[in-house]
Each structure stands twice: as structure tokens, then as C-alpha cells.
Image: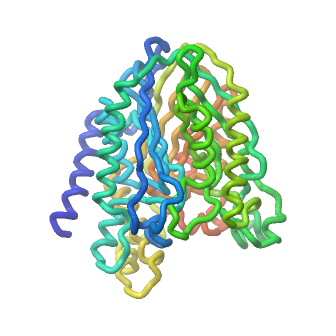
Amino acid sequence: MNPSTEYPRRQFIEKTILASAAGWTLSAPLVEAAERGTNLHLAPFRFDVTPPMGHSCCGGWITPVKAIDDPLEAIGFVLLGAGKPIVICAVDWTGLLNEAHVQWRTALADAAGTTPDRVAVHCVHQHDAPLACLEANRLVVAQGDLPHIVEADFFNRCLDAARKAVTTGLTKARPVTHIAHGQAKVDKVASNRRVFRDENGRIKAMRGSACRNPELVALPEGLIDPWLKTVAFYDRDTKITACHYYATHPMSYYGRGHVSSDFAGLARKRRQRDEPGCLHLYFTGCAGNIAAGKYNDGSTERRPILANRMYTGIVDSERKLKRTPISSIGWRTAELLPPVRSTLNAESLARQIATKGKHISQRNRPAYQLAWLRRVEQGIPFILSALTVNDCSLLHLPAEGFIEYQLRAQQANSSRFIATAAYGDSGPWYIPTKEEYPNGGYEVSVAFADPAVDDLLTKGIRHLVA
């Protein structure tokens, strides 16, 4: 490894060690006692993260950027007055993995005057968008004949934009006095991808983001979470921020090189135009096994239909909002470092990356796997977190978790209104439940963590929503 590639990785490890010394990678879960909700302020921020022409989409194995159908954004807020500042951010990208996710959290933390453990960054997971893993990118760049996963200069420009946006946002902070939550069912969007099974429960075929197989389309929705949830913050009687949560892969069609925030992003943008004075954010829940396939044939005509159904769900959920004064607020974290699947071997993965003539996905994907393996070897954990305000919890989880994890969170504390954002640090790609590993299917084939991740993640979730 040459010095130019070694330095960023060494810097990443050093930053993590320093963070550990500061107390945010301790083996015990971190808990902050709830504080009285007085003198709270909220500082909004947003900035453009649209990739340039020719940039890779979804990690490099679909058509790169040829056109911009609608721009991509990072949107978030800094919450002030509950101890050290808390930052929550949603990004219109496919994913932020490992070191890339840490760098985003660190940049936002530095600008907000807080620590990375008090920053939650989540991707919406559109596919005609960037997917950033810096270690995987170094591995493919070293080959010389593979498309870059993410361009370093573009990535760094986004970090600079993040710092600037937060700094500017802090000058516009306004009081937060009340919170409200509501939910509404979304009609004919989400469906379970893993519903076509043999007599032993093994997956025979997947109903993906789009599906034109009439046999698969005719099958029931399967297990989903039908509720779109909204949590809103108020300055007295003025709604200043609304966070929307729904669990489905947010793609109608993709792979044509046309960058788009797709139907979930278009619904959010429409709602933002309705209420320009209120900051609207959208978070994708645990959608590892959830997509629109039952209701989407992948045609261009379906995108606005799905966007309208999402928009209707957002509006309906906001009709249920009832303000209550903020009486308590807290930030709670827990660690997760699941073991690597036994099928992943560093030498074998390196050979796959270097094998000329194979399809890009057969060389890029091992780079993500090797990056994950190295991350676990370095002992760098995820930070799960939850913002608790009154009887509401905003739960922040990593990767492409199956819908069961979101439902478990709600079952773990039925007295709380729990809104789940997944697609945080997506280093391990999919996180199936342990029962689903033996049943195979696409999601299991690209799950980098051992089935033991189920018990670890479930324990962390229960702690966060207790």
C-alpha cells in the first residue's frame, strides 16, 4: 500500500482511538439521563449532495450519472440544550459505509460542537445515487481497471458543505417547546420481498423493488410495517421540523444513469413545497426485506403514482399530530460489533477483486466484504442511538435490517411511539434475522455479518427503547 492510500486509513483508525478515549466506544451501553426540556433550540441545515456527471451510482455496477432528474440533498438539524448538541441527518444516497460513515458523523459533530456519538446519519437508500465506502474504493482504485466507488474530491466537497451548512444553521436556531407524533397507513407501496418459498421455507424467487412476474405480484403483501410515522417539533404553535419514517426500499426504477431522489424523495419535496417554513426530513426504516414490487412494474409511469401514495401517507400522518410540551429529553447509545460470516476470507476476497474479466459486481462486491472484514478486525463498532422526547423515541439503526427488527422495537415498549431510521452505517450490508439465514435468497447472500448479529442487535434495540 502506498503512502497516499495508507494515510486516510491510518487517520481513520487514529480518530477512532481518540474517540474511544473520549468514552464513546466503551463496551457498556452509554446512557444519558433525561433532562428537563427547557431552553431547547433547533438549528436546521440542508445542502446539496448531487454527484457530478460520470460519477458511479450504487457503488459502480449500474450506469453512472448521465443526467440529473432531480437533485439529491442532505437534510438535518442540530438539537441544542440537552447536554452536548445532538445532530440528526438524512442523506439522499444509497449508503455510507464504515470509514465514510464515521467521517460524515465526525464532520457534522465538529461543526456542531459535539462528539460523533451524538450524531445520527442515515441514507434514504435510493440507487441512482452515490454509495460511499472509502476502504472498498481504495481496493478497487488499486486495480486500475474498475470504476471508482466514490470520487474522493466529491466526497470531501460534501463534507465541506456539511460543515458550512451546520455552521450557518446554528445562526438560525429557534426555540423548541413542543413535540407531536402521528401515523397513517400507506396504501399499496410496501410489500415483503421474501414471500415465494418452497415447502421447507427456502426462498425460490425474490419480489424486488420492481416485479413483472404475475405469480409473484399476486402473492400477498407479506409481513410489513404499514404505518408511516411522523414526529414534529414546534416553537410554541409553529411547526418547525417534521421527521417522516416509512419502511420500504425507495426505488421505482433505477440503473439508467438518471439521478433521482425517487418516489420517497419526491413525496418529501412536495410536502416541503407545501410548508416552506417547516424543515421536512424522510428516513427509510428497516426495509432490508421490503420493497414496492407487488405494486410496481418498474415503468416510468409508476414513480409519480408511488410518490403520490407516499405523499398522501405523510399528509395523513401529520393530520394526527397533537402538540404536547416537552417535559423530558435524553440521548441513549449502545454498541454493536457483530462477527464476520465464516464464509468471508481475506485472501479469497483479494483474489476475486483482482480477477480480470469478471463482471464489475463480482469484483466490487468483494471489496465491500473485505472492507467490512478489516473494519471488524480493527474492532470499530457501530453506535446505535435513540433520541427520547416525552413518550417518543427516534431510533437509529445501521444497515439494511429486516422489518422484524423495527417491529421488535415497537413490541419491546408498546407504551412509547417509536420511529425507526435504518441505513445508518451500512458496512455489513443486509442484516437478516437469524431464522432467515438458512432460507437463502439474495439478501442472505449479501449479508456480511454472522447470524449472531440478530441477538446482539435485538439486545441493543431493547436497551435503546426501554
Left or right relative to 97: residue 404 = right
In front: 432, or 327? 327
Residue 44 vs residue 423, the one in the foreground: 44
The reply, left or right, for residue 157 in relation to residue 369 is: left
Q: Which residue of the protein is positioned furthest toward the bottom in this rendering?
A: 357
The residue sitting at 48% across, 36% down in the picture is 385
For image coordinates 52% across by 54% down, the residue present is 70
- Residue 162 on image: x %, y %: 35, 42
Quarter of the image containing the C terminus? Answer: top right
As drawn, is 236 to the left or to the right of 149?
Answer: right
Instruction: Name the residue at 39% across, 49% down.
Output: 101
Which of the 4 image quarters holds residue 410?
top right
**Depth check: 9 or 434 in front?**
9
Q: Quadrant of the N terminus?
A: bottom left
Q: Where residue 439 sits: x, y (%)?
A: 67, 66
Q: Position of residue 371 (x, y in %)?
A: 37, 63
Residue pictured at 68% horizontal, 25% vertical = 321
Can you say whether 203 is above or below 76 in the image? below
Quarter of the figure with residue 170: top left
* Residue 172 at x, y percent in the picture: 39, 24
Q: Does any portion of residue 449 appear in the rendered image?
A: no
Q: Tell how many labels.
A: 0
Question: In this picture, is 259 found above or below 120?
Answer: below
Residue 321 visible in rendering: yes
